[in-house]
Amino acid sequence: MISNGHPVAANRRLSVPPRHTRPPRALTEPELTALLRVADCLIPASGPNPKASDADQYASYLQLALAARADAFDAIVAGSSKLSDVPADELWDALKAMSVEDEATFVPLSSVLAGAYFMTPQVMKLIGYPGQHRDPAPLELAAEEIGSGILDPVLERGFIYVSAVDE
């Protein structure tokens, strides 16, 4: 494909990063066990809300969350693995200490574990979150906006284009 005289990869979208649905590598069984243990400590069962590892499809959504944070995958796995030998009754305090002493590990670790939990359909239903969806403006509203003159300053300014390829 050619754009403004420059070749452009057909599948390249400069404004949108590629979407990854798998982590950089498969988790080992001990790594998954360590992550689930930390997740359950951070998100225990409460009322009708299940603990993290008991949420339907949690492990699948954990894989998706790890893929989304591939940049922090090694830190997340290493952080949870460091905690694998901490006794259960000391894990909360160890996580609190990590949050202060090693924020660079704790933030992505806790974010991925919580993010996976809130992505599960079961938890989304429990909290009443319908998920993301498109809500396009009706055609009449678009016509009204264009007719209102909102674009007049842009049209008067004229074309402004700077090619990202030329830079």
Image: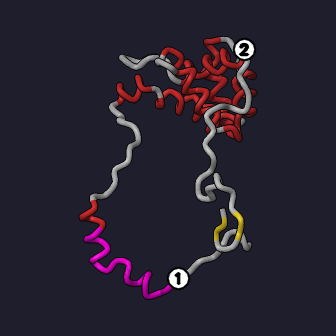
**Residue 160, quarter of the rendered image:** bottom right
Q: Which residue is mark 1?
A: 159
In depth, the one of 92 and 5 nearer the eye is 5
**Residue 127, quarter of the rendered image:** top left
Residue 72 in picture, x, y percent from top left: 70, 38
Type of amino acid under label 2: Pro
- Give the label on residue 30, or none: 2
Residue 92 in picture, x, y percent from top left: 60, 21
- Badge 2, how many Cα within 10 Å: few under 14, some, many 20+? few
What residue is shown at x 34% (from left), y 77% (from top)? 150
What residue is shown at x 30% (from left), y 66% (from top)? 142
Q: Is residue 68 left or right of residue 56?
A: right
Which quadrant of the figure contains the N terminus?
bottom right
In depth, the one of 156 and 110 nearer the eye is 156
What residue is shown at x 63% (from left), y 46% (from top)? 18
Q: Main SS of the magenta segment?
A: helix
Type of amino acid under label 1: Phe
